[in-house]
Amino acid sequence: MKKRIALIPGDGIGPEIVDGAVKVLDALCDKFNHEFEYITVDAGGVAIDKYGEPLPKESLEKCLGSDSILLGAVGGKKWDTLPANLRPERALLALRKELNLFANIRPAVLKKQLNSASPLKNSVIGDGLDIVVVRELTGGIYFGDRKRESETAYDTERYSVAEIKRIAKVAFETARLRKRHVTSVDKANILASSQLWRDVVSDLHKDYPDVELNHMYVDNAAMQLVTRPSQFDVIVTSNMFGDILSDLSSAIAGSIGMLPSASLGDNTRGMYEPIHGSAPDIAGMDIANPIATIVSAAMMLEMSFGMTKEAKAINNAIDAVLDAGYRTADIYSEGTTKTGTVKMANLIAKEILK
Ligand code: NAD
């Protein structure tokens, strides 16, 4: 199958980790007889330096002309003093908006080999952790009316039935591929927008009788995530609650260098990226963990291209390399073998070809 992939290496460690993911995708092409055409796209700080803006028109057009997008990370100190509308992160917001990527999907998986990477006790983690947070990404309080006056300020949380329905559908469909359980998180004891959220999710649930649904207030959900995380399968929630809960679930899943994400819209084209940033403190040192980006590429294969067995091959290869004791610095522990970015990606690629 031939697919066109827009690669956005971005800034800091971005180019190193995207290179690693491409190595793994190339191995996969050899193994499964696929053809991927890569189109490198400038976005973020690197685009500001070249073109004076974080997402030049040409870059956006390349993304729109691709089957999917794989992003490293953007940003860095060099651009921190620019006005907000010219900062590297603007490229991400513009891409989400232009591609209508309303669903942010963040799996928080703690692999058994890395149990000690979680800040939670083993008795809480149990048999590991495997949660997916489905966050609404283009609505809610981050996009509502806001105003600041001298003595007061306000922000507005507004959701429509259509916006809630489409994100809830993503959650139910995701759950169908997993343990068939959705927890919808809101603050329906206080917020009108949450009451609508709860009603719409409950209503849509009638179309998914095979999936179990429960509702939880956001304050309780935060507490439950750190006290009994194993009760969760898929969590669906609004933009702001999802922002907070997805970071919380990532933190309990251990290293930031392991966790991927997907942002999806109405069609199969998505944007896939690690949850971490551009890590300028370790850029160019060959110590960044490429696994989050490699798992993001696996999500792209599965969710955008329907290549389930190929995605599985990547995840199995990562497990095999971890089982063999190889670790980048961020997940290193005594008795394991410290490995750089390039070598880690090579090991995973080699494992796929075995
Ligand atoms: P960060 O995620 O870049 O780094 C936080 C810490 O985690 C650092 O110590 C870093 O070395 C480490 N780390 C991150 N990724 C790693 C990896 N793959 N392997 C090993 N260690 C890793 O967050 P930050 O330092 O707050 O932000 C740095 C820059 O990234 C900022 O300019 C920020 O705006 C930007 N940022 C971009 C994105 C994105 O592109 N999606 C997301 C978050 C932050």
Image (cartoon, helix red, strand yellow):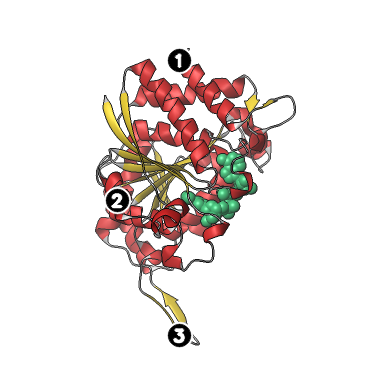
| Place of residue 186 in the rendered image (x, y in percent of width and height, measured from the top left) | 43, 58
Pick out the residue farthest to the bottom: 150
Foreground label between 2 and 1: 2
Q: Is mark 2 within 8 Å of ligand 1?
A: no
| Place of residue 179 in the rendered image (x, y in percent of width and height, measured from the top left) | 42, 34
Q: Tell me the amino acid under the disc marked 1.
A: Leu
Q: Tell me the amino acid under the disc marked 2.
A: Glu
Foreground label between 3 and 1: 1
Q: Earlier in the sequence, mark 3 or mark 1?
A: 3
Near-viewer residue (193 or 286) = 286
| Place of residue 139 in the rendered image (x, y in percent of width and height, measured from the top left) | 34, 61
- Determine the secondary structure under disc 1: helix
Residue 149 shows which numbered tag? 3
Q: Are marks 3 and 1 in contact (CB under 8 Å)?
A: no
Q: Which residue is mark 1?
A: 353
Tell me the quarter of the picture where residue 33 sits. Answer: top left
- Determine the secondary structure under disc 2: helix
